[in-house]
Image: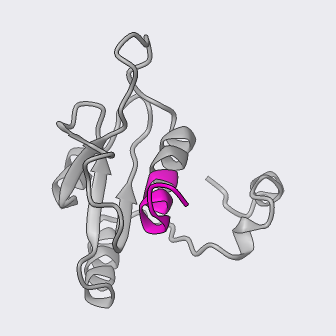
Amino acid sequence: MDIYDPEVIASSTGSFFTVPFELLSKADEIDKLIDGLRREHPGLLVAGTSAHAAQSAYDADLGGPLLLLIGNESDGLSWRLKHLADALISIPMSPVSYATSLNVSCAATALLYEAFRRRRGANP
């Protein structure tokens, strides 16, 4: 993945220059990042996503400091990332839907919106 690809930058509609990001390829880099975030943000919830999680995003405490770990649609989060998470949460899906999961961008959108909604109150 090339985050500096011109298409990536253009599709971000400016967010690329305002949202911090980290590219991590080694397990110890992920551990260090999470440990540092926990020290910097007391009460940080590291929430991993899983289509099979018993806890719904609607029931999770997404109103405080939050790090979302979101896996891909086919395989989800790795075993290791699931175990780094404080909680595994699912995105509620319609019981009559054939879909069992969302692609990563849709999942991120749904979860970030829910976290934003919590911060603003249920009826902003």
Residue segment shown in magenta: 113-124
Q: Is residue 115 magenta?
A: yes
Q: Is residue 104 magenta?
A: no
The way the protein has been coloured in the rendering is one colour
Q: Nearer the viewer, residue 7 or 17?
A: 17
Q: Residue at x 38, y 58 (%)?
A: 68
Q: Whole-percent x and y of residue 91?
A: 37, 37
Q: Nearer the viewer, residue 29 or 57?
A: 57
Q: Residue at x 48, y 58 (%)?
A: 117
Taking 74 as reference, is 104 left or right? right
Q: Nearer the viewer, residue 2 or 88?
A: 88
Q: Whole-percent x and y of residue 32?
A: 29, 79
Whether residue 72 is situated above or below residue 65 in the rendered picture: above
Q: Nearer the viewer, residue 34 or 14?
A: 14
In terms of secondary structure, what is the magenta stretch mainly? helix
Q: Whole-percent x and y of residue 45?
A: 26, 67
Whether residue 80 is situated above or below residue 21 in the rendered picture: above
Q: Where, by quadrant of the figure, is residue 6 drawn?
A: bottom right
Whether residue 79 is situated above or below residue 10 in the rendered picture: above
Number of numbered labels in the structure image: 0
Q: Whole-percent x and y of residue 13?
A: 80, 59
Taking 63 as reference, is 81 left or right? left
| Quadrant occupied by the C terminus | bottom right
Q: Residue at x 33, y 89 (%)?
A: 40
Taking 60 as reference, is 107 left or right? right
